[in-house]
Image: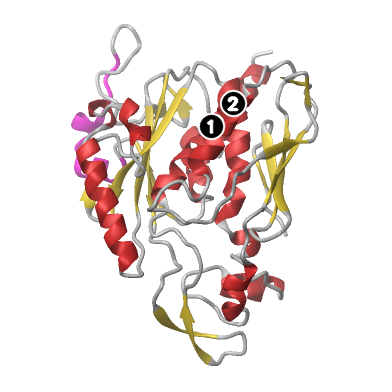
Amino acid sequence: MAGNSFGKIFKLTTFGESHGIAIGGIIDGCPAGLSLDFDAINTEMQRRKPGQSAIVTQRKEEDQIKFLSGIFEGKTTGTPIGFTIENTDQKSKDYSHIKDIYRPSHADFTYDKKYGIRDYRGGGRSSARETACRVVAGAIAKQLLQNLQITAYVSSVGEINLNKSYSEVDFSEIEKNPVRCPDPQMAKKMEEYIKSIKKQGDTVGGIITCVIKNMPVGLGEPVFDKLHAQLGKAMLSINAVKGFEFGSGFAGTAMKGSEHNDTINPDETTKSNYSGGIQGGISNGEDIYFNIAFKPVATIMQKQKTIDSKGNKAIAEGKGRHDPCVVPRAVPIVEAMAALVLADFWLLNKITKL
């Protein structure tokens, strides 16, 4: 299987399956001498872990990280950082009923046809459980990028939209509610809606907005490795993501060039920021902001028509513990992937200026 690594200089390779003994990763290219704040890394893991509220899966994983290499006396040594996270609350029997059944909108069918073998327990390698490894690496990347502020939050759930720009919300409110919406009133509406969807045995999607402040000028390359292209790839690699837009996004198509152009001030800032902090694939020093669309979780507690591995008609029905809405738990994953992209470009920029 290819495609288990992300990044060029600051590079993460992950391994493991949802119901295996453990998942883990290797971070290569992290500079030596970085003092790590392990409490901060653990905080990021707690934000992503299951069982943290009534509106997410009740699988209980403590997500304790065991670092195996690359760290000595609390500092990175410059060698590969290896780590594992044990799977302690997997219930494989919850998936025995779909051993030979392809669940609608899951990776079951494509995975089986491509590899000729499928780990049906929780989706195996295609499970979102793998994203815990990304959060570990992202937490370290954040510490490498000390001056940058990477903040993500839920801006919509289903048809309930925040309808506020990132400059109009209070980031300090994000972690005060289980939905991770920066508006307390909208957060309550979203939470109640997710609970009602869960009672129906159904699921719902939503949108996460991410904002990156204190950006330097010059990160990104002008052709295939445009900064926004790499951010898009990073976000689209997250389970359940169906769309990515940065800056003015699709709304910008309704504007005239005279309205959309970001005029430059004498101090090199821009009067507007429809470019989303990126021009020609390179950061211009303004805030980077983008939206990520998440589909409804594919596992629903309702009967659905499908086929089995022999092509026979079958019925699929979700059992076990699943998220009725994935977006609240995906917030730290979005931040982590953004940090990985920026760490990679930051290190590349240092090399090209030597």
Q: Where is 141 relative to 136, above or below?
A: above
| Quadrant into which the N terminus falls | bottom right
- Nearer the observer, 244 or 60: 60
User: Which segment did they paint magenta?
Assistant: 249-264
Residue at 64% across / 58% down in the picture?
A: 18
Q: Where is 144 relative to 245, above or below?
A: above
Disc 2: which residue: 39
Residue 229 in sight here: no
Query: Seen from this angle, which residue lies furthest bottom?
Result: 312
Res 166 → quadrant: top left
Main SS, magenta residues: helix
- Kind of residue at badge 2: Asp
SS class of the residue under badge 1? helix
Picture disc at residue 43: 1
| Quadrant into which the C terminus falls | top right
Query: Tag count in the figure?
Result: 2
- Nearer the observer, 289 or 326: 326
Find out whether the residues at labels 2 and 1 contact each other: C-beta distance under 8 Å: yes
202 left or right of 104? left
- Kind of residue at badge 1: Thr
Separation (CA) of disc 2 from disc 1: 6 Å
Picture disc at residue 231: none
